């Protein structure tokens, strides 16, 4: 019962479902852990994800990737405190989105979410709203205008991220159906992955991609450093989603690490067999695939489930990279859909079975079977996917009426560092 009470804050905010808990006493241990987790999740974006992506592009575009992450982090933070948090986590009268009752963070200083101050919950959730559009960066590097990124990410936050967060974590219709998404398989990885696929299709291929001669990552070293930061930061991402310093958080961190390890090792084995040489970039990418896959299930599954999710996520995401990039010739530049989208969807669906006590999970809710939970999980994936695809496409098309989405061919050839930002990542 203690587990259910604590984890349900994530899905439906027990302030809404069980109002008597809204006046729970602040727990200093829980508060300290979520303060730490908030820092860890921000650390995932700045500098973790920024360095991970920066190492994968050509050297003439490294500054542009860092600018994109920094700009998104700043702008999403502003929009989140003005209206984003209210739209995602106020009660509202709609099944689609919250209301504006908490506009500009009009919340009581004494208000709690569980045993932590609500203002801290705002900060913790802000780090999630930052990293989600930042993940999409990997789909459009080396060919998009900086102004388009800022406009798209801002509108996308309001029209895609906030509604889905409300459905799953803010007391919306998916929460009422009993969907399980502990730390963002749907809210973060599915939305980011599918938005990335849409924007890659709308933008079209890079010039280097069309020549079938993509330049290799300019710095696997930067990518490995960024990946390591992501790995450590993910403990706050998944462990912090328990909203308490307890057994749930501890278990979430353990299974997160196990899945990341197996995801990375599965890519090592695949590359070793296929090419005779395991690559550093492959290891790092497999690690991220394992992390994305465990995320929705991290607070519900045991070690057995983590092993299954890490292995299946590593293998399926590897196959998805081949399918999207090589067979379908889609220039999702840094494999956002194949890794985050596929991993998040897979983990969300498999959670329905792996939550079962027979796999070492916490067990299904009373009266729920694996089959009925599976139906809910699949329905949630379909609804989230359709919403994300439709609105991501419409946002891009609307922006394109006023602004050309891509840089000019000369700017792309010269590199975005100098042509858009007047700087160079490496000055000899």
Image: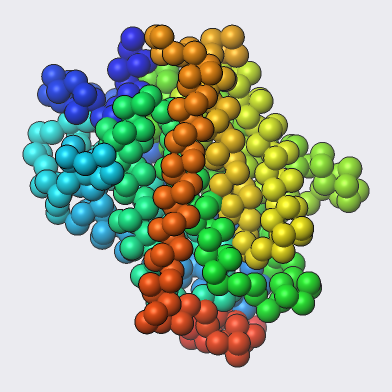
Between 98 and 94, which is closer to the camera in this rendering?
A: 94
Which residue appears at 78% of the width and 51% of the height? Answer: 279
Does 217 sit above or below residue 277?
below
Q: Is residue 133 left or right of residue 280?
A: left
Q: Does the rendering let one see residue 169?
A: no
Q: Is residue 231 left or right of residue 9?
A: right
Residue 305 is situated, as x and y percent measured from the top left of the image, at: 60, 22
Q: Does the rendering let one see residue 303?
A: yes
Residue 147 is situated, as x and y percent measured from the top left of the image, at: 40, 76
Q: Is residue 154 left or right of residue 266?
A: left
Residue 413 is situated, as x and y percent measured from the top left of the image, at: 64, 85
Tell me where residue 122 sits by quadrant: top left
Which residue appears at 60% of the width and 87% of the height? Answer: 409
Residue 285 is situated, as x and y percent measured from the top left of the image, at: 66, 48
Does 123 sit above or below residue 379?
below
Specify the farthest residue to the bottom: 410
Does 364 sit above or below residue 192?
above
Between 386 and 161, which is closer to the camera in this rendering?
A: 386
Which residue appears at 62% of the width and 37% of the height? Answer: 290
């Amino acid at each position: 019962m203690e587990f259910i009470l604590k984890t349900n804050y994530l899905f439906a905010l027990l302030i809404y479902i069980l109002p008597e808990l809204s006046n729970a006493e602040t727990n200093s241990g829980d508060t300290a852990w979520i303060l730490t987790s908030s820092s860890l999740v921000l650390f995932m974006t700045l500098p973790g994800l920024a360095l991970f992506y920066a190492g994968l592009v050509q050297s003439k575009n490294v500054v542009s990737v860092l600018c994109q992450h920094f700009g998104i982090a700043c702008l999403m933070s502003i929009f989140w405190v003005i209206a984003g948090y209210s739209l995602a986590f106020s009660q509202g009268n709609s099944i689609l989105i919250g209301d504006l009752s908490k506009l500009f963070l009009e919340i009581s200083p004494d208000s709690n979410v569980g045993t932590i101050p609500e203002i801290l919950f705002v900060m913790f959730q802000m780090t999630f709203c930052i990293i989600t559009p930042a993940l999409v960066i990997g789909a459009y590097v080396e060919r998009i205008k900086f102004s388009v990124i800022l406009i798209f990410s801002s509108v996308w936050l309001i029209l895609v991220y906030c509604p889905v967060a409300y459905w799953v974590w803010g007391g919306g219709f998916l929460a009422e159906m009993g969907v399980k998404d502990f730390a963002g398989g749907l809210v973060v990885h599915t939305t980011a992955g599918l938005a990335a696929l849409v924007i890659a299709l709308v933008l079209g291929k890079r010039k280097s991609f069309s020549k079938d001669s993509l330049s290799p990552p300019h710095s696997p070293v930067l990518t490995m450093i960024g990946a390591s930061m992501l790995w450590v930061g993910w403990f706050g991402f998944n462990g912090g989603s328990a909203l308490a310093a307890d057994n749930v958080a501890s278990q979430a961190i353990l299974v997160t690490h196990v899945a990341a390890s197996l995801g990375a090792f599965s890519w090592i084995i695949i590359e070793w067999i296929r090419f005779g040489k395991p690559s550093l970039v492959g290891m790092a990418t497999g690690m991220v695939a394992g992390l994305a896959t465990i995320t929705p299930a991290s607070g519900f599954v045991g070690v057995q489930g983590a092993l299954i999710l890490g292995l299946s996520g590593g293998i399926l995401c590897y196959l998805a990279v081949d399918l999207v990039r090589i067979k379908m010739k889609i220039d999702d530049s840094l494999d956002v859909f194949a890794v985050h989208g596929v991993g998040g969807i897979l983990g969300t669906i498999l959670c329905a079975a792996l939550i079962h006590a027979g796999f070492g999970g916490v067990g299904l809710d009373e009266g729920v079977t694996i089959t009925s939970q599976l139906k809910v999980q699949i329905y949630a994936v379909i609804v989230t996917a359709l919403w994300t695809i439709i609105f991501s496409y419409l946002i891009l098309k609307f922006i394109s009426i006023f602004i050309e989405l891509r840089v000019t061919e000369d700017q792309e050839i010269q590199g975005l560092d100098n042509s858009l930002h007047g700087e160079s990542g490496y000055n000899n």
